[in-house]
Structures are given as C-alpha cells and as structure tokens.
Image (cartoon, grey):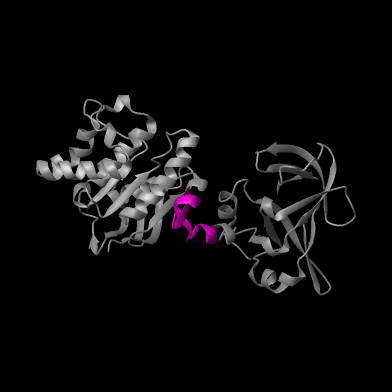
C-alpha cells in the first residue's frame, strides 16, 4: 500500500502563502486531482510532494515514511510534466530506458521493461524513432512510458495533456484513466481544467490562494459545493449567482434579489441559523433552470440576450434586470433574441451561500 499524506503542509515565499496549512490523504491506488485556477498552489503542492520544494512547515508522508529530508530520487516517485522533456538525440527506446540505465539495471531487464511499457501504451512500433518524428500524443505516451518503467510507488502528473489539441486531449484523458487503473499506482494529477478533473478523478482536491477548499468525489463536489467559489468553479457553464436580502414577512421568509423574489420559507430555520447577516447568495446551475415563451405574472421574467449553440444543447443568456442568468436548453428550442420568457427554478437544486463567508448554508 502507498498512501500519500500531507500534514499541516505550508510553503511561504516571504509574505506570499503559496500553500497554507494543507491536510490531505491520498489513498492507495487512488487518482486524485489537484484542481484550481492559476496561482492556487496546486503545482507548488505537487513540487513539495516531489521534493523539488522544501516545506516552510508540515510533513509529507509517502507510505509510512516522512520524506521531507529525502531528495527526489529517493522518494520512489515518477513525474510527467506539461513539457514532455524527451531527449531529442535519443530514440523512443533510449528515452524510455534512460531512467533504468541511470539505476544500473541490467540490459536484459531494461529490454523487457521497455518493451512491456511500449506494448501497454501502444507505441511498440515507434521504438526506433526520434521524438521529432512523433506527434504530440505519441510524445506524451513516450513520457508516460519513461515514468512507467521505473515502477514507482507514486505518479505525479503536472498538466500532462495541456499541450495537446482538444480532440486528442479528450482521447488521452480516457486512456490515462484506464492506464492508471490497470497499473494500480497512486496518482496525483494537477490540472486547472475542471472537466478534466471531473472525468478522470476518483476524488478532487480543489484549491484557491493556497487553501484547500473542498475534497470529495466529482459528484459530491458538483452537487454539494462547500463554498460559492467551488460552486462557480465546477460546472460548465458555471453556476448562476444572485445576491439576495433576507426578508421576513409574518411567519414566511423570502429572498429578494430585486428582479427575483423567492419564497424560502421551507428553509427558514436553516437560513436563519446559519446566515451570518441579512444577505445570502442564491446559486442555481444552468441545467436546473427551465425556460418558456411568453412572460407571465408567475416565475422570473427576463429577456433573451444571446444564444450560444453547442450542437447537443443551447446556452441561453437571459437578462433579468441587472442580472444575467444562463440556461441550458435542448438544441431544438426556437426562441428569438429580445423575446420575453419566463424562468422557473428547480427548487430541489437550489444552493444558498453566506454573503460574508462564502460558505454553503444549504
């Protein structure tokens, strides 16, 4: 078993807290993605695990061993970078074999391991080519092969698909996921692409500004975001947000966003208990908003502002006074720009966030 545990891990550069007191356990054989925008601290976290950075505080465990004082080569990890860093003067065979030669593995074992890795990755026919003769996807497979032959305890992957075109990236993320399951090697995968994280990961660790905001399965993070930032970062298009005032009228409670007035009496006790002030943020995903022609006195009335066709669906942008609400709709919806429509929200899919803390209320 090879678990990776981060215990109160921090990395500061002067006043900048690139990684701020992270506690995280990556399970044996798990594929965990470190997800977040640029500057969130995900790559620094990976470099701390790899030994390429020294922690300001905290400990890194690989298996049962604290590896803080071990150099990268002694941590039994293999890294795959955004840049494949292949040696241009070497053949594919020699590139894959290189880490084994450095470890003085016998020629017979090297040959067997290289051929096994090449067969696993479907690049056996490329072993005598040079990197410049390969496509981007083939180069990526060679970089993976070089990591696989070492049979490490842990894979660390830093945005390895970002240099590929969209179609190949789609194909390779499925291949990478299948490969990781076949090999059963604990894998930490860094990406800023939430679709990549959602489709590949067993669990996602979402970071922002050096902080670990939420850890969970893709479905859990999508369905139950812990903060407003998580709700907005996960999902495409992102969640719609409306700033609302809490209004009490008799025994009923309403959320007033000016153009949107929501009866929230059924959540009255939760909102009053957990909200830190008189304002909350209402969140609703585009797929949980339905649209109809013709404004009425019921529901939310808005004007069709712009339509984004995506083939399998439409993204309809509805202007509701000062707010813009995105709606996912079927591709056969015929609706002219500028027309008035009525929106209804799926009340079972509403999210409420505290205005001050940004933390989820419901």
Q: Is residue 3 left or right of residue 318?
A: left
Task: Judge whether residue 214 is colored magenta.
Answer: yes
- Inspect this view and state whether residue 9 appears: yes
Q: Position of residue 106 (x, y in %)?
A: 9, 44
Q: Is residue 273 left or right of residue 66?
A: right
Up-down: is 310 above or below 154?
Answer: above
Task: Look at 29% across and 47% down and name the residue there.
Answer: 53
Q: Position of residue 24 (x, y in %)?
A: 39, 61
Q: Is residue 68 left or right of residue 190?
A: left
- Inspect this view and state whether residue 15 appears: no
From which residue to which does the magenta span run? 197-221
Q: Nearer the viewer, residue 258 or 303?
A: 303
Circle count: 0
Task: Look at 64% across and 61% down and name the residue there.
Answer: 354
Task: Look at 87% across and 57% down and name the residue there.
Answer: 298
Q: Position of residue 34 (x, y in %)?
A: 42, 51
Q: Residue 262 is drawn in which quadrant?
A: bottom right
Q: Nearer the viewer, residue 354 or 336?
A: 336
Quadrant of the image for the N terminus?
A: bottom left
Q: Position of residue 302 (x, y in %)?
A: 82, 46
Up-down: is 81 above or below 229?
Answer: above
Q: Residue 115 is drawn in which quadrant?
A: top left
Task: Judge whether residue 273 is colored magenta.
Answer: no
Can you name the residue that lies furthest to the right here?
297
Q: Nearer the viewer, residue 108 or 260?
A: 108
Quadrant of the image for the C terminus?
A: bottom right
């Amino acid at each position: 078993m090879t678990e990776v545990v981060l215990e109160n891990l921090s990395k500061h550069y002067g006043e900048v807290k690139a990684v701020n007191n992270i506690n995280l356990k990556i399970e044996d054989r798990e594929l965990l993605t470190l997800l977040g925008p640029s500057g969130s601290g995900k790559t620094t976290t990976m470099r701390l695990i790899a030994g390429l950075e020294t922690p300001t505080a905290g400990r890194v465990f690989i298996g049962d061993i604290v590896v803080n004082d071990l150099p990268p080569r002694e941590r039994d990890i293999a890294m795959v970078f955004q840049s494949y860093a292949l040696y241009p003067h070497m053949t594919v065979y020699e590139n894959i074999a290189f880490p084994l030669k450095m470890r003085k593995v016998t020629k017979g074992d090297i040959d067997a391991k290289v051929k096994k890795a090449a067969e696993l990755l479907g690049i056996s026919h490329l072993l005598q080519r040079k990197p410049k003769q390969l496509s981007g996807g083939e180069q990526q497979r060679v970089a993976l092969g070089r990591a696989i032959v070492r049979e490490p305890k842990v894979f660390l992957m830093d945005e390895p698909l970002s240099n590929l075109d969209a179609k190949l990236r789609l194909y390779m993320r499925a291949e990478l996921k299948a490969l990781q399951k076949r090999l059963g090697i604990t894998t930490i995968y860094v990406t800023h692409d939430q679709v990549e994280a959602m489709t590949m990961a067993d669990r996602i660790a979402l970071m922002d500004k050096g902080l670990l905001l939420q850890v969970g399965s893709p479905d859990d993070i999508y369905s139950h975001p812990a903060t407003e930032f998580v709700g907005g970062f996960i999902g495409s298009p992102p969640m719609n947000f409306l700033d609302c005032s809490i209004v009490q009228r008799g025994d009923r409670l309403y959320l007033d966003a000016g153009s949107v007035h929501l009866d929230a009496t059924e959540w009255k006790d939760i909102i009053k208990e957990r909200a830190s002030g008189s304002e909350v943020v209402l969140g609703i995903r585009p797929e949980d908003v339905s649209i109809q022609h013709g404004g009425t006195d019921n529901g939310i009335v808005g004007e069709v502002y712009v339509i984004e066709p995506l083939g399998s669906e439409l993204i309809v942008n509805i202007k509701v006074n000062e707010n813009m609400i995105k709606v996912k709709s079927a591709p056969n919806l015929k609706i002219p720009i500028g027309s008035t429509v009525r929106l209804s929200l799926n009340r079972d899919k509403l999210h409420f966030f505290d205005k001050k803390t940004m933390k989820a209320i419901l």
